Image: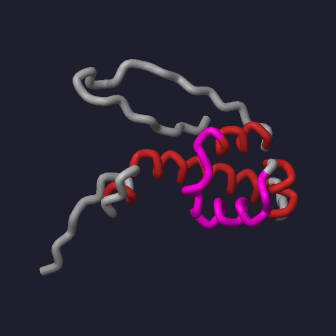
Amino acid sequence: MTKVQTGTGNVYKDLGSVNADDMLVKARLATKIAEIIKYRHLTQTEAASILGMPQPKVSGMLRGQFRGISETKMLECLNRLGRDVQIVVRKAARPSLCGRTSVVFA
């Protein structure tokens, strides 16, 4: 019989990454940036110019290599691509626990 284990919804956590929650946030931001670039039919060179990043850095981000890119820079990229970014801070659902960061797209 094959043993099946249910995932947490965060592949980085499932793989044991130390910064799993941060990596998931960055992955979701990178995915949205990639969607916008594709929707606008931008080349990586054009996107790099708009984002204020070197083309190789854009290429890496689009391939999931975003460890060297801060969340702040990714939010700035979304602004440069014509998206408003809103950060909402509220009480944790369970106050006795640490809060969490998530990304929600409207």
In the rendered image, the quadrant that contains the C terminus is: top right
Q: In this picture, is 82 found above or below 91?
A: below
Q: Residue at 25% of width from left, 28% of height from top?
A: 97
The one nearer the camera, 67 or 34, is 67
Q: Residue at 82% of width from left, 54% of height from top?
A: 40
> How is the protein colored in the picture?
secondary structure
Residue 25 vs residue 6: left or right?
right
Q: Residue at 39% of width from left, 34% of height from top?
A: 100
Q: Percent from the top left, x then y, of residue 84?
A: 71, 31
Residue 46 vs residue 26: left or right?
right
Q: In this picture, is 10 found above or below 62?
A: above
The verdict on residue 13 being magenta is: no
Q: Quadrant of residue 79?
A: top right
Which residue reaches farthest left?
Answer: 1
Q: In this picture, is 62 found above or below 27?
A: below
The verdict on residue 67 being magenta is: yes
Q: In this picture, is 41 found above or below 77?
A: below
Q: Residue at 30% of width from left, 53% of height from top?
A: 8
Which residue reaches farthest front?
Answer: 68
Q: Percent from the top left, x then y, of residue 83?
A: 73, 36
The stretch of residues the image draws in magenta is: 53-72
The one nearer the camera, 53 or 13, is 53
Residue 5 vs residue 88: left or right?
left
